[in-house]
Image: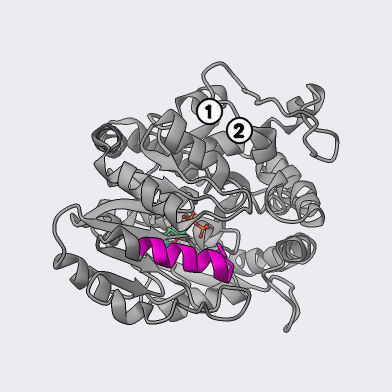
Amino acid sequence: MKNIHVLAIPYPAQGHVIPLMEAARCFTSNGLKVTFVNTEFTHKRVMSACSEIDGMQMVSISDGVEPGDDRNDLGKLTKTMFQLMPTKLEELINDINKNEDEKITCIIADCYMGWVSRVARKMGIRLAVFCPCSAAVLAMIMSVQKLKDDEVINSRGVPLKNETVQLSTSMPFMDPANFIWACVGDPTTNQIIFDFSILGGMEAAEAADHIICNSTMVLEPGAFTLFPKMLPIGPLLATNTSTNQVGHFWNEDYTCLTWLDQQPLSSVIYVAFGSFTIFDQLQFEELAQALEDTKRPFLWVVRPGTSGGMDYVYPSGYLERICTLGKIVSWAPQQEVLNHPSIACFVSHCGWNSTMEGVSNGVPFLCWPYFADQFFNKTYICDIWKTGVRLNQDETSIVTREEIKSKLEQLLINKTIKENALNLQEKVVDCLLAGNSSNTYLNKFIDWVKEGND
Ligand code: UDP
């Protein structure tokens, strides 16, 4: 019998692989076959951190980066991928399509892998785009031409104005300095991201029949109304179905869940900054000291080797002093952590997945964005949903221990923020129920995929 066969391809970063794998699990549980294409580098990491991935064919193609070259150089990685991956993907699809019953019915491409749309067009395969960031950010990407016409940015994407812009009256205001392509890295990296990822994403979004988003109508009504092609099917979380999260690049340390079991209800400060964020040693020490000074239980994710290659150095005697108060792990099962009743708040870099996970669990945020779309996500949390507070840097660009401690104290006693977070959680989780918005859009999308097999 002929399979309805979806090929899913994420951008090779942690915050892209996890939600697309979760979307893919929704498809397999609806009877679709999924081939999930990682880069070879990512594939090895995912497979070594996960013993079993239910019902999906996990395959890989090269990202074209030579051994010894720096994959953390996002500009270089992006350029290489856009140049070398199309041929590899075409070869893979041709290989799969040799079996008439297995032929690829449609491709779902991450919006930051815009080159995939050309492969899909060339091979005559239907295309959908997956948006792992907020719908508002993708709406901005889809509006690049309008931003140029309105002289908000120049032809190379560089912001020309300081004033905030609004794509429609129901959309949040956005600061051009926070456009995703303006805050990824140095000017050269930003330019490559604009030329390849952003313009490529725009092209793919235009070419796609549908864009599926890890978001909900209640969180971003303005963006979804403006671009009805975007279908909110989120939140895409493993905890929705009481399963383990898949797609991790590191092994999760489950001892922190046992530790959380021993802490009082709503007492623990959870501190985690996703998979990219890097602190310098001074900033690291300020944070360490603030957590100790706050005198509340804390669970802190410290990824090893992220301070520019070396490991962080804790203040003298720190680990001995905090051993009854704090738990430090190198990678947590974050969705389960945020779902734990002992969690009081989330000190977060505001990556979109962390944002969705915190919101879905009614957890208030202390926002500490690092790069890319995280600055805009902070705006959603602090100014639109009002479920968190922001940290400010001092005149030397440091977030001081006093600032962290004082904002944590403010957040933990703020009943309105907690109420807002619980109200939002209820509305967001409700979207997944049968017949409600995210569930309806998911079914609409699956029907579209199935039509391709007629
Ligand atoms: N994550 C995790 N354990 C950790 C830290 C992060 O499982 O200790 C997961 C988190 O649940 C989220 C993803 O890694 O799904 C990070 O994505 P996000 O968009 O928040 O940030 P990014 O890593 O892309 O900056």
Q: Identify the amino acid type marked 2.
A: Ala
Marks 1,2: beta carbons within 8 A: yes
Which range is magenta?
Answer: 276-291
Inspect the magenta stretch and tell me whether residue 289 lies in it: yes
Percent coordinates x, y for residue 21 in the rendering: 44, 59
| Image side of residue 158 versus residue 356, left or right | right
- State the residue lying farthest toward the right: 155
Per the model, the C-alpha gap separating discs 1 and 2 is 6 Å
Residue type (three-letter) at the residue carrying disc 1: Ala
Residue 306, picture quadrant: bottom right
Give the residue number, with chain letter if any, for mark 1: 223
Packing grade of label 1 (10 A; few <14, some 14-19, many >=20) is many
Question: Can you identify the residue that label 2 sits on?
Answer: 139
Of the image marks 1 and 2, the number of the one nearer the N terminus: 2
**Residue 75: where, in percent of width, then height?**
75, 60
**Residue 383 lies in the magenta stretch:** no
Image quarter of the N terminus: bottom left
